[in-house]
Amino acid sequence: AQTVTQSQPEMSVQEAETVTLSCTYDTSESNYYLFWYKQPPSRQMILVIRQEAYKQQNATENRFSVNFQKAAKSFSLKISDSQLGDTAMYFCAFGTGNTPLVFGKGTRLSVIA
Amino acid sequence: AAGVIQSPRHLIKEKRETATLKCYPIPRHDTVYWYQQGPGQDPQFLISFYEKMQSDKGSIPDRFSAQQFSDYHSELNMSSLELGDSALYFCASSLRTGGSRSRYEQYFGPGTRLTVT
């Protein structure tokens, strides 16, 4: 069974600064997908970014980028130029495409003005 | 772009009552997932459907059942409700087939907040 671990329950960052959220996972699968979801106070689950395991290039989406280290089974999220609207719970998730997502426990990020 | 629709958004029931949650996936998506998120918890998978057939089953209580209809909408039926069933219930949809760049991405609805008193 796959497991996802987020070791930082809470983090804070100053507005306009950069912050990195950590995620590690364990799997015996060779082909899989990794995701970061954002859950703001509204509790909507918003897909932020995804990474295919077979791609070596790290995914980027505007101010969001990932550092995917397949051998280390690590998948961190970097948020650049943090904005107040980035304040949310962030979940790392693992999937194999045709299967349900397995989520980490989440990291609560607070962006401070 | 069209998103996943869930209804109702809020539901208050008493213990031992029944509840039905509805989900309308993104058009042309062929897979629907149901997740339960308790307070301060991460989403936990309940059940999924692919092309109207049950695909995977997670930690769904026997008191719960679900199905996907010919128009691809899905319903989660919950009976003999317990206080512990109070949670946010998400439906997510995705596309398994085809060569879309967004293939396998799961898009979540706004959730149904169920409160059992």
Image (cartoon, rainbow, N blue to C red):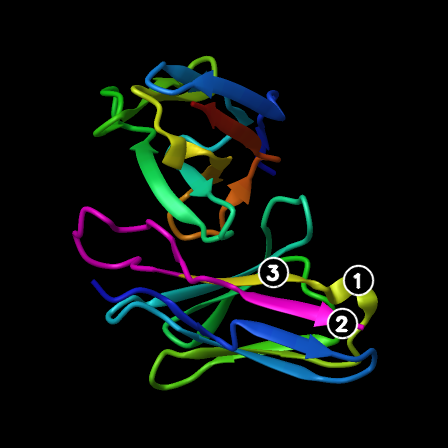
Give the Cα separation between the discs numbered 1 and 3. 12 Å
Magenta residues (range) = B93-117
- Disc 2 to disc 3, how far (Cα)? 12 Å
Picture coordinates of residue B69, whole percent (x, y): 42, 84
Q: CA distance from mark 2 to mark 1?
A: 8 Å
Q: Looking at numbered disc 3 in the image, what kind of residue is underneath it?
A: Leu
Residue behind mark 2: B116
Lower sequence index among marks 2 and 3:
3
Label 2 resides on the chain identified as B
In the rendered image, the quadrant that contains the C terminus of chain A is top left
Q: Secondary structure at mark 1?
A: helix
Q: Looking at the figure, which quarter contains the N terminus of chain A?
A: top right
Is residue B15 covered in magenta?
no
Q: Which residue is mark 1?
A: B84
Q: Helix, strand or loop at disc 2?
A: strand
- Same chain, marks 2 and 3? yes
Disc 2, disc 1: CB below 8 Å?
A: yes
Category of crowding for the residue at label 3, using alpha-carbon neighbours closer than 10 angstroms: few (below 14), some (14–19), many (at least 20): many
In the foreground, B1 or A113: A113
| Camera-side residue of A80 and A35 | A80
Using the image, tell me which numbered label, if any, was put on residue B88: 3
Q: Are marks 2 and 1 on the same chain?
A: yes
Estimate how packed mark 2 is, as few (under 14), some (14 to 19) or many (20 or more) residues with alpha carbons within 10 Å: some
